[in-house]
Image (cartoon, helix red, strand yellow):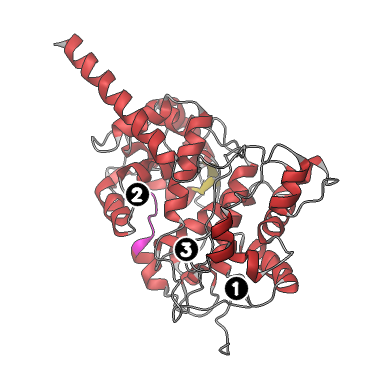
Amino acid sequence: MNCCYSSISSLIFIILIFHLISISSLAYPVDQDVDHQHGPSTDQDLSSTMGYSPNSSEDDSIAITTIVPPENEMLGSEEWPSSSYYHRRCPNKSVEQIIYRKVKEWVDKDYTIAPSLLRLHFHDCAVRGCDASILLDCEESERRADVSKTLRAFEVIDDIKTEIEKECPKTVSCADILTAAARDATVLLGAKYWTVPFGRKDGRVSIAKEADAIVPRGHENTTTLLELFQSMGLDVSDLVILEGAHTIGRSSCREVQKRIYDHKGSGKPDGSIKKEYLNYLQRKCRWESEYVELDEETPWKFDTMYYKNLVNNMGLLSTDQLLISDSRTKPIAKALASIPTSLYAHIFGASMTKLGSVGVLAGKDEGEIRTNCNFVNSYDY
């Protein structure tokens, strides 16, 4: 019986790996001769695709490239989704180059801003889709919601938007900027580059109560998370893959104190937490205003340590640890714990591409292109 079970488990594992590899093809077109980790192979290619000068410093050009679309797409594609959306709209200006350079400037000054950009993007897409509604700064907006209190990096998007408005005014949406910035920030911490289609428009509606009702806080059950992801057009694989974003960044202790001191009102900590890890968390999180790394082992490196931690009962949030105990998510989480970071990075990029396509406003009469990401436009054009 044990041998039979082992064979079945191995077969399931192999099937899962092939499934995950097939997912990654969504973000990495095989017909493009591009190294997605380091960009085009020559300075001339880099200059033509990103607008970089061949004389740019090495630091400025790492880990960034743009997929050059087929000629017919460059000439004829005007609508979402298109990697060439801004080629005609901003001639001689590389929108992606500006975004990357600005993100790198901020990350170089404060590397903790990188996961904050990724989190900001998820919060945006979870409510009303990827429409930059999280950026609107007005009374009772998503940005003012209780669940948004620890969000940051708004100033990064403002900085990018200001620069782009100088070069290509009233053209590039805040939703596109946020999506690309989240990608670039993650790449700067070790992820693989993935293609971001452009053409999103910015929403005009942002409601705090919707954010508080929808965005996870780290203590939901797996069914609740699956229902949220399914409502966004994502599946169980995407849930487990995107939770891996917790391999970088930190959480406020406010979100974990009940788990480590009074789990489900028992007056005791969650018994599933590894003892040594629990001791560490209780020392780290005496006050809810403190912060603790989501991945205690390699908190600022994009890798698969998050999944290895789950196997060792070292998931910070209860939603993290449940991935390894729920039968719907456990096989995927265990598979991801055993694959190389390079493969996981490709898979992650594919799921991020799907996330960035949720609820996009792209129709002629949908949304707008904000000139200031914090406010809806006061005019039509």
Disc 1/disc 2 C-alpha distance (Å): 31 Å
Residue beneath the point at 54% across and 50% down: 195
Q: Nearer the viewer, mark 3 or mark 2?
A: 3
Residue 180 image label: none
Q: Residues within 10 Å of mark 3 (few under 14, many from 20)?
A: many
Q: Main secondary structure of the magenta part?
A: loop
Label 3, on which residue? 124
Which circle's residue, 1 or 2, is located before the other in the chain?
2
Q: Residue at x 55, y 41 (%)?
A: 248
Residue identified by numbered label 2: 219
In this orientation, which residue lies closer to the viewer: 121 or 363?
A: 363
For the N terminus, the quadrant is top left
Quadrant of res 106: bottom right
Above or below, 15 against 76 in this view is: above
Task: Tell me the magenta residue range.
Answer: 214-220
Determine whether, in the image, residue 121 is placed left or right of residue 105.
Answer: left
Q: Amino acid at mark 3?
A: Asp
> Quick one: 55 or 242, which is closer to the camera?
55
Residue 368 left/right relative to 158: left
* Disc nearer the start of the sequence (3/2): 3
| Crowding at mark 1 (Cα within 10 Å: few <14, some 14-19, many 20+) | many
Residue at numbered disc 1? 373
Kind of element beneath mark 1:
loop
Q: Is residue 255 above or below residue 81?
A: above
